[in-house]
Image (cartoon, rainbow, N blue to C red):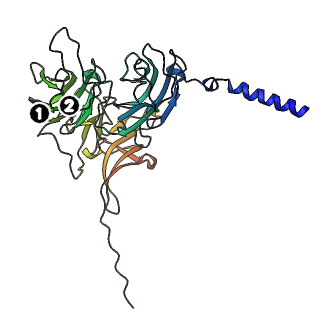
Amino acid sequence: MHGAIQMHSTILLIGLFATIPITATAEDVSDTPEGAKSTSKNRGIKETLISATDVDFFRFDVSKDRDYPERDASGNITVTLSQKAPPGANPLVGWQLDLYSEKNFATPLYTATLPETSLETQFEQGLSLGRYYYKVSSVGSGGFPTKEYTIQGSWEESTQYEKPPNDNTGAATAIRANEAYYGNLSSPSDIDVYRLTLQAPDSVTITLSQEMPNSDSTIGWQLRLLSPSLLQQEIVNVPSTTLKGTMQVNLEVGMHYIFVQALPPSDEEEETQAPVGRKYQVIANAPNAPVPPENCEFIFTYAQNPVTQHWAMFPTLCDVPPNWVSQTTLPELFEVCPSRYATYTFPDQNTDGIGMLKVPYLDLTDGLGNQLLVRIEMQQEEIQQTPEGIPLYRFQLLPEKLKLIRVLKEAPVEESPAPETP
């Protein structure tokens, strides 16, 4: 009798658990960026909206290289929003996916929608270093999608993509002459701005192109050039029915700005129809632009960080990180780090009465014949005077402050003579 009662109780418990909705046992994803669920650039996400007002936030980072923090680790992400078959029958029900930068939650970098009647949609977006968020919500007035959705990211590290937000000259994506860069307009009002720096006057040909034209001539891109070398902007319209549009201009030394935006409507009453999500390529060909050398000679090169806009000095052009705009002349009105000159700090209270000499770049040949470029720091030991009363400074090299920057030339390896045969 006791066993029967126990079995009956077990059946009741199983029935009770069977009536509990599955979504009630799962933890809902945060509705705010502050509590966003962590993911990565390449990780897949599977979740479900639990109501028409439910919102899911996920975050991921595009991080710098710990071993080489100055390296440009930006790139391009391809995002796929999908559901499992079979699709639904109501086109008014679906998901909306917004991609945000943590710097701006007012305007998404990209918005994609997936109705229940479709299996998947895909978009791509260039991203610089920083934190980004996916926001998933319900779209349409006919209810909300109850099926599971999937977000899958695919990351490509590359310096050849736009780095939004780049909608003004202050945030323009830095590009090099004679190299192709890629971008896409994420909305009808989106503007992509690129910054080209020339080290010598040049006849520059700027081309915007696409791979697959379509049949609608009312949408497309407008290519604009803003330059101190021109009295007015140069403008070329590129309808989506054409493969490319080109402008050729004579430009002086300095910074020049290339704008890519939606083709303006032919009628003032019409709304702009941008080729949203369609990838374009932009390239500025300049015959006089310096070609990267095959041999890296010790020549001071100045380059600007495209993210922070700070200028830095490098011993050779080969040391300049990819996508940094470089020049051999000292930039005007900008502080450069580190200084190319040796600096001396007089002994005072701040230095504990010890003078310090810092040499940022020193060409050194070691005992084996290797030519090295090093950075050294020396501590003043004493001050002597010549019979004429001229002060003489003596400095001691601090081994812990000796840093190898690069090997300029390796010493030839001498082959050992072969042992004599007895």
Kindly identify which residue carries mark 2.
196
Q: In terms of secondary structure, where does tag 2 sit?
A: strand
Q: In which quarter of the image is residue 249?
A: top left
Give the amino acid at mark 2.
Answer: Leu
Q: Which residue is drawn at 22% across and 28% down?
A: 332
| 181 sits left or right of 107 in the view | left
Q: In which quarter of the image is residue 66?
A: top left
Q: In terms of secondary structure, where does tag 1 sit?
A: strand
For disc 2, the neighbor class at 10 Å (few under 14, some 14 to 19, many from 20) is: some
| 327 sits left or right of 6 in the view | left
**x, y percent for residue 344:** 35, 37
| 398 sits left or right of 413 in the view | right
Count of numbered badges drawn on the protein? 2
Q: In which quarter of the image is residue 20?
A: top right
Q: Nearer the viewer, residue 321 or 258?
A: 258
Does the image show residue 35? yes
Q: Residue at x 26, y 20 (%)?
A: 168
Q: Which of 118 and 334 is in front in this view?
A: 118
**x, y percent for residue 38:** 52, 30
**Residue 389 numbered mark, or none:** none
Q: Nearer the viewer, residue 351 or 281?
A: 281
Of the 4 image quadrants, the one containing the C terminus is bottom left
For disc 1, the neighbor class at 10 Å (few under 14, some 14 to 19, many from 20) is: many
Q: Nearer the viewer, residue 380 or 87?
A: 87
> In the rendered structure, which disc, 2 or 1, sits on the residue that comes first in sequence?
2
Q: Residue at x 15, y 11 (%)?
A: 267
Give the amino acid at mark 1.
Answer: Val
Kindly identify which residue carries mark 1.
204
**x, y percent for residue 307:** 33, 30
CB-based contact (under 8 Å), mark 2 and mark 1: yes
Residue lying farthest right? 1
CA gap, disc 2 and disc 1 = 11 Å
